[in-house]
Amino acid sequence: MKKQERGFVLIVTLWVLAIATVLTLSLGRRAFLDARAAAYGLEQTQARLMARAAVNRGVIEIRNKFYKDLLNLEEQNSEVGFGGPPEGTNLGQPWAHPMDLYAEGASFEATEEFDNDVVRLTIEDAESKININSAPREIIDNIPFLDRSVKRRIWTRRTGEEEDEEIGPSRFQAIEELRYLRGMDDEEWFGEDGEPGARDLLSVWGFPLININTASREVLACVPDLGEAAIEEILAYRGAPPEPGQQGAPQRGFKSLEEVQQYTSIQGDAVVAIQKFCTFDSRFFIITGLATRQGGKVRVECQAVVSAFDGAFTVHDWQERSIGA
């Protein structure tokens, strides 16, 4: 074989080896990425199932609350011959305390892979907020952090009346819809100077009345004629909420208007305001389950809105979202 031919064969061989090497590396990388994607998908599925399990645990907590209320009411009926006030809904009850189900030993797969992860459950009383779909006009108009034009558009949306034309009422499906109303700015939505905004204090779920046992100071301030002095007494009776990671004062709540008058000095217009705009028991709850994998790199949140009426439990909304790399 001539020298030139041998050189040509060598060059071709080197090219073939180079192409084979590139193909091998590409296939290896593709296989690595496929394996990584499959592992991520598995971890995301695990997190989603655990988050759903947390929501189901939340439903059980709400069921337990109402079954206990029914038992207490039956005991009152049998002892005194008539129905006393229900137990009510307050922040001292078990459902109101956030839980890490994995840390407390729930029956998830217990391996070292989960040691830096959480399965967290939180339950929020929807009637601790102002329901923009059903709250009385007086409460809507008394919200201090909303511009007058936003309040008018909320009411227009609810009644379906715009510029003397009947377009039919339309319910807000999610509180985020408020964000896009003309006149709603970032300060109103997010809050400012450490104060909560519309996204924290308003809701699209629950009954028209506000639960004075669970509502924040800012929500109670929206109740017409309630007044700062009455709000201070209500919060003092309820007890100071605990700081994160600390033990707070025992939480409790009023069962009826009679108890408000018995245990506080609230009277006059404030009593009328409580009777007209407030409640002591709630029926709608927002249950959120958050689960993580890979030390929090994969996060899945499930959220359900449930209601409880006379032992019947209904899921009104269910949302899931994944957060992670």
Image: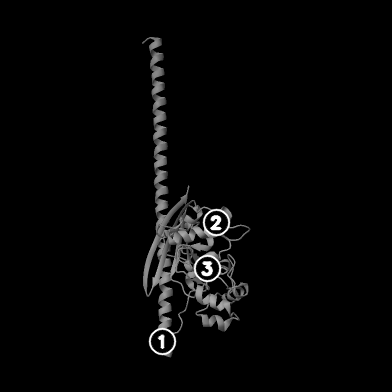
Is 275 located above or below residue 77 in the figure?
above
The reply to whether discs 3 and 1 touch (Cβ–Cβ < 8 Å) is: no
> Picture coordinates of residue 127 (x, y %)?
48, 68
Task: Give the Cα separation between the discs numbered 1 and 2.
Answer: 47 Å
Q: Residue at x 40, y 49 (%)?
A: 41
Q: Residue furthest bottom?
A: 80
Task: Give the Cα separation between the discs numbered 3 and 1.
Answer: 37 Å
Label 1: state its secondary structure: helix
Give residue 189's mark: 2
Q: Which residue is mark 1?
A: 77
Q: Quadrant of residue 26?
A: top left
Give residue 138's mark: 3
- The disc labelled 1 sits on which kind of residue? Asn
| Label 1 or label 2, whichever comes before in sequence order | 1
- Work out whether residue 118 can be spotted: no
Q: Please give left or right for residue 4 compared with residue 202 in the image.
A: left
Q: Looking at the picture, tell me which residue is in the foreground, 143 or 122.
A: 143
Q: Please give left or right for residue 150 compared with residue 12 in the image.
A: right
Q: Residue at x 49, y 52 (%)?
A: 180
Q: Please give left or right for residue 14 compared with residue 91 in the image.
A: left
Residue count near mark 3 (Cα–Cα under 10 Å), binned few <14, some 14–19, many ≥20: few
